[in-house]
């Protein structure tokens, strides 16, 4: 699960499968950030509220029985583990073994089923009642065709009436471009710099967290993303046979407006009888 994002709010975003950064691989983000991810992003969103929201979605979708969840880019299991603790069947997919090692440590009972792989080609067969991708992680896929393919792969694995929940930032309009350097955090013994470059043509943001700790070697923690607008995501969903059911600004169901900096979009796979 990513903790980055370059949206209207100025937050940062995440990783992907592209050669835009020389030497970068799909698993690079997790390999380089797994050791600090939970510490850096423990407050990225309210876990309790997000889990409660997903639980409510599942209850409405399954009419009360335990739900079959699929989390894309599950990461360290920040959401997957508490969902499993609520009695749901949870499967988490992530390309990073380093991230998944932290999930395994957080879930010694193995309540979350782990799949090592990407969120297009390696999804388990399902069917699932609820699939979700949290906090900009969909943007780890750095080409539009791969994001579209993700929607298609999820749609194929949703049960009829199942839903795909996508949480992401809203890109700047007009898009930003160029390079920037910011201080992410600073203490007496540590400085973390965030270096980014944005290409509005490809809609890619590439960057490095430069982690400087007194008396230690420099640590480089790269990230790469390809952002999409809500309208673009809606197009991917429609092509995959999904339809937008609802869209809010956040899990608190704050109304989504033209000024919203983030969105929580729920796409559903229609029930066949309802399509006639």
Image (cartoon, rainbow, N blue to C red):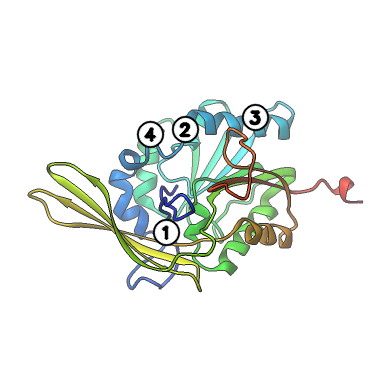
Task: Looking at the image, tell me whether mark 2 or mark 3 is earlier in sequence order.
Answer: 2
- Mark 4 highlights which residue? 106
Nearer to us: label 1 or label 4: 1
The numbered mark, 1 or 4, whose residue comes first in the sequence reads 1
Q: CA distance from mark 1 to mark 4?
A: 23 Å
Q: Nearer the viewer, mark 2 or mark 1?
A: 2
Image coords of residue 257 (percent x, y): 63, 46
Q: Residue furthest left?
A: 215
First-in-chain label (1 vs 3): 1
Image location (x, y in percent) of residue 135:
49, 46
Q: Secondary structure at mark 2?
A: loop
Which residue is nearer to you in this view: 120 or 261?
Answer: 261
Dot 2: few (<14), some (14–19), or many (≥20) neighbours within 10 Å? few
Q: What distance separates the C-alpha of mark 3 from that of mark 4?
A: 24 Å
Number of dots carrying numbers: 4
Tell me the residue that label 2 is attached to: 46
Q: What residue lies at 41% left-to-right and 33% top-to-bottom?
A: 107
Q: CA distance from mark 2 to mark 4?
A: 18 Å
Tell me which residue sits at (40%, 42%) in the image.
Answer: 76
- The residue indicated by pointer 1 is 15
- Tag 4 or tag 2, which sits nearer the N-term? 2
Front-most of residues 114 and 142: 142
Labels 2, 4: front one: 2
The secondary structure type at the circle numbered 4 is helix
Taking 43 as reference, is 59 left or right?
right
Q: Position of residue 179 (x, y in %)?
A: 34, 67
What residue would you read off at disc 3? 56
- Estimate the spatial distance between the alpha carbons at disc 2 and disc 3, rounded to whole Å: 15 Å
Residue 118 showing in the rendered view: no
């Amino acid at each position: 699960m990513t903790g980055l994002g370059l949206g209207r709010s100025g937050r940062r975003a995440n990783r992907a499968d592209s050669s835009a950064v020389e030497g970068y691989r799909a698993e690079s983000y997790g390999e380089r950030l797994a050791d600090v991810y939970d510490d850096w992003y423990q407050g990225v969103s309210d876990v309790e509220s997000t889990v409660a929201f997903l639980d409510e979605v599942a209850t409405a979708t399954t009419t009360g029985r335990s739900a079959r969840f699929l989390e894309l880019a599950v990461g360290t299991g920040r959401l997957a583990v508490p969902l499993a603790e609520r009695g749901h069947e949870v499967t988490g997919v992530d390309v990073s073994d380093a991230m998944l090692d932290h999930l395994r440590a957080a879930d010694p009972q193995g309540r979350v089923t782990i799949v090592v792989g990407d969120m297009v080609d390696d999804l388990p067969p399902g069917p699932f009642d609820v699939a979700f991708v949290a906090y900009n992680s969909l943007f780890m896929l750095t080409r539009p065709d791969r994001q579209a393919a993700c929607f298609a792969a999820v749609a194929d694995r949703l049960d009829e009436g199942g839903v795909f929940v996508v949480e992401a930032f809203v890109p700047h309009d007009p898009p930003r471009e160029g390079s920037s350097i910011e201080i992410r955090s600073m203490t007496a013994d540590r400085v973390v710099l965030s270096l980014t470059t944005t290409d509005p043509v490809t809609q890619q943001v590439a960057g490095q967290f430069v982690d400087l700790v007194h008396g230690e070697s420099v640590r480089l923690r790269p990230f790469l993303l390809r952002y999409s607008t809500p309208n673009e995501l809606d197009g991917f969903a429609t092509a995959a046979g999904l339809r937008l059911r609802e869209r809010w600004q956040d899990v608190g169901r704050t109304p989504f407006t033209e000024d919203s900096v983030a969105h929580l979009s729920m796409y559903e796979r229609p029930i066949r009888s309802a399509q006639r």
